[in-house]
Image (cartoon, rainbow, N blue to C red):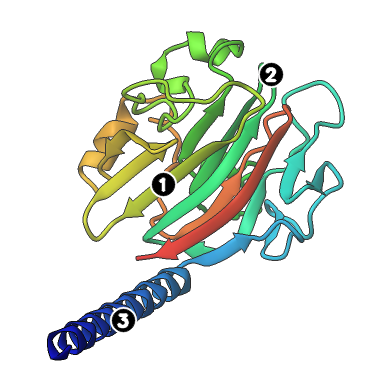
Amino acid sequence: MKNGILIIMVLLFTVGCKEKAKKEVEKIVAVDVLNEAEEWTVLFDGSSFDGWHIYAGEGVPEVWTLDDGAMVYTPSGEGHGDGANLVTDKDYTDFVLSLEWRISEGGNSGIFWGVKEDENLSEAYQTGPEIQILDNEKHPDAKAGTTHQAGALYDMVAPSKDVTNPVGEWNTNVITINHKTNEGIIVLNGVEIVTFSVNDPEWSEMVSTSKFADWETFGKYTTGKIGLQDHGNEVAFRNIKIKEL
């Protein structure tokens, strides 16, 4: 009988310890999740365009709308676009940017960083390097070379592979720009597909062999705005957040 009582006491003690340990683990995980959440700043929560405006202007034009938690650009007509690139209100230097994008059939768009708003410059791409968004199957840019395909550092570094989801489906892009470590990293749908240097002399050497070689202002600003491109094709973005480094 005594042995039975002793066994029960040991079991209760063991269970109690396990429960206590489990609660401690859950507490640690909860704190880690909270800390992780605190590191990120939401740039677009799906409910408003707060924190964004049209490049070199004010407000957000009607060609950009909110639909089911996404910001959607719908072109007003045929042509290159409506001059409706969106940029963040705030400037960023070193960061990890995470977002989802969905491109239309035959569509083209992009994500900029280091955008400098200047009344003498009409487009965000005149200063901001671009991560390409593209329908690799049907847009002619994909045939122009791999440095023009989705996920590329546009006209400079090609993706190591095509990991895009079919047109109409969402793609997750995580972009790291870190001047402290001289790293640019592009991850698309969980796969690291592009790496590059962001500091001179490597950066300027890379630009010198691209179409931007003679552009006086291109890629010159380490601090600038994040931009979303109007290229005349329907495109949608959602779940946009940033972690400053």
In which quadrant of the rendered view does residue 117 lie?
bottom right
Amino acid bearing label 1 = Ile
Please give the label number shown on residue 103: none
Q: Does the image show residue 29? A: yes
> Is label 1 in a helix, a strand or a loop?
strand
Q: CA distance from mark 1 to mark 2?
A: 24 Å
| Residue depicted at 82% across the width and 47% down the height | 65
> Is label 2 in a helix, a strand or a loop?
loop
Q: Nearer the viewer, residue 92 or 46?
A: 46
Q: Position of residue 45 (x, y in %)?
A: 67, 60
**Viewer-nearest of discs 2 and 3:** 3
Please give the label number shown on residue 175: 1
Q: Nearer the viewer, residue 160 or 203?
A: 160
| Residue depicted at 47% across the width and 70% down the height | 37
Q: Earlier in the sequence, mark 3 or mark 1?
A: 3
Above or below for 210 versus 35: above
> Is label 3 in a helix, a strand or a loop?
helix
Q: Position of residue 84 (x, y in %)?
A: 74, 42
Amino acid bearing label 3 = Glu
Report the residue marked by disc 3. 24
Q: CA distance from mark 3 to mark 1?
A: 34 Å
Q: Nearer the viewer, residue 78 or 102?
A: 102
Q: Position of residue 221 (x, y in %)?
A: 42, 54
Above or below for 235 versus 86: above
User: Does 238 sit left or right of 146 as displayed?
Assistant: right
Callout 2: few (<14), some (14-19), or many (20+) C-alpha neighbours within 10 Å? some
**Viewer-nearest of discs 3 and 1:** 3
Report the residue marked by disc 2. 105
